[in-house]
Image (spheres, rainbow, N blue to C red):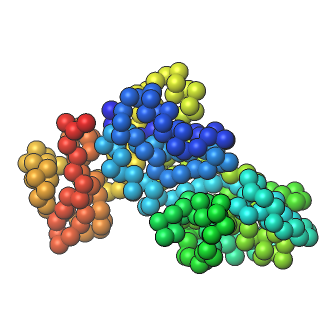
Amino acid sequence: MHGFLCIDKPLGVTSHDVVAQIRRLSRVKRVGHAGTLDPAASGVLVVALGLATRLIEYVQDDTVKRYDAGMTFGIATDSDDATGNPIRTATIPALTAADITRIETTFCGDIMQVPPQVSALHVNGERMYDLVRRGEAPELPARPVHVYSLTVTAWQTPQLYFTVTCGKGTYIRSLARDIGECFSSAGHLHALRRTQVGTFTLAHSVTLPQLQKDGVTTHLQPTHSAIADWHHVIVDDGEQTRIQRGMPIGAATDAHTRAIALDGNGRLIAVLEYQSAQWHPRKVFQWGEA
């Protein structure tokens, strides 16, 4: 069994728990998720089965994510969300229309962001949340992230709601914290729902109860669905043989740096990379593999 599941993860469940449940339901050993979603967040969790796990890196690193978020002004927590302990209180700002515009412009584009102290980031081989528990967490440096858009959807003192479309490594908890500090206040994230990961959206997701009822195969999406928005190269039998031997094939265009090779039946053959007027195979799929 090979392919992807787009799960609508409920609150209070870890991404690891979801993977374990799908492994039991499918009886497939190779199962993994393409990007952790915290227990306090719900929404799109992309899970790969079988050979689809070889494409996880593209889903996790190269795709746009979209979130619906809610933050509370006036209280900062040690985790930057509602699961943490309060560490500071501050005056709640009276946001104006100009302030809303300021938020939408200041936190959009290429920005520098300090990750939350309580996170799964590795520092010297250990997770930050483990270091925090021991009181050994170092100060984390700011790092560049990209926010494609941030739109405020509602403001009801002291809560602000917004939608974010962002790239890899962006912490919505950090956005909530930084928005609070931007107004000489404090803030933490109190609600988060992921609505999109690349080509996977809530509209095509399935809940865990529904998956248990219908079975995994009913909701399994094709392996190449994760990178379906890449350039497609349809290969004939001869080209397929060359690719499966690790050999390049001719490229008719240099307009794309990477592509997916499909056979005449639309089955994924390989991930290709353009170089010197040729398509070079980078990941080749042999469907006889377990």
- In this rendering, the answer to whether 227 lies above or below 175 is above
Q: Residue at x 10, y 44 (%)?
A: 237
- In this rendering, the answer to whether 74 lies above or below 66 is below
Observer-nearest residue: 55 or 256?
55
The reply to whether residue 203 is in sight is no
Q: Residue at x 78, y 74 (%)?
A: 181
Q: Residue at x 10, y 52 (%)?
A: 245
Q: Residue at x 20, y 70 (%)?
A: 275
- Quarter of the rendering containing residue 187: bottom right
The reply to whether residue 50 is in sight is yes
Q: Residue 144, image x and y in percent?
A: 55, 76
Q: Residue 73, image x and y in percent?
A: 84, 64
- Quarter of the rendering containing residue 155: bottom right
Q: Residue 154, image x and y in percent?
A: 80, 56
Extreme top residue here?
A: 213
Extreme front residue here?
A: 134
Residue 197 appears left or right of 242: right
| Quarter of the rendering occupied by the N terminus | top left
- Quarter of the rendering containing residue 76: bottom right
Q: Residue 114, image x and y in percent?
A: 63, 73
| Quarter of the rendering occupied by the C terminus | top left
Residue 152 appears left or right of 251: right
- In this rendering, the answer to whether 28 lies above or below 152 is above
Residue 124 appears left or right of 103: left
- In this rendering, the answer to whether 183 lies above or below 248 is below
**Number of numbered callouts drawn:** 0
